[in-house]
Amino acid sequence: MSPDSVTPGSVRSAAEVNEQIRALWRRAGGSLSAQEREEYELLVVEWAAAIRSEVVEAA
């Protein structure tokens, strides 16, 4: 996943991003390549932003 694949301002739920993270780990068989690690890191950042967004909306 390149940084360009996540459109700024696009909003996926934390659950959607979490499922994508889980799918990445399943595909990787528990050991990430350098490219998969990069994708994972981007997904975690997106997941954290989604969590923050959901908390702000709930407040």
Image (spheres, grey):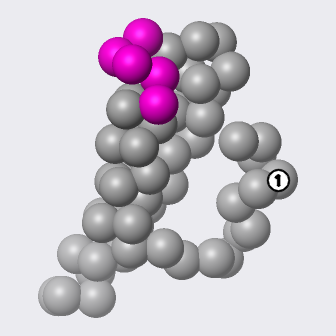
In the picture, the quarter occupied by the C terminus is bottom left
Most extreme residue toward the left, as rendered? Answer: 59
| Residue range highlighted in magenta | 27-31
Instruction: Indicate left or right for 5 with 24 as reference.
Output: right
Residue nearer the viewer, 49 or 11: 11
Residue at image point 39% right, 73% down: 13
Q: Is residue 38 magenta?
A: no
Identify the main secondary structure in magenta: loop
Instruction: Indicate left or right for 42 with 8 as reference.
Output: left
In the picture, the quarter occupied by the N terminus is top right
Residue at image point 50% right, 15% down: 32
- Residue 16 locus on image (x, y percent): 39, 66
Relative vertical location of residue 35 with respect to residue 14 in this rendering, above or below: above
Identify residue for label 1.
4
Q: Let me know if residue 45 appears in the view.
A: no
Residue at image point 50% right, 54% down: 46
Relative vertical location of residue 25 with respect to residue 56 in this rendering, above or below: above
- Residue 28 locus on image (x, y percent): 47, 22
The image quarter containing residue 38 is top right
The image quarter containing residue 19 is bottom left
Residue type, label 1? Asp
Residue at image point 22% right, 75% down: 55
- Residue 11 locus on image (x, y percent): 54, 77
- Residue 36 locus on image (x, y percent): 59, 24
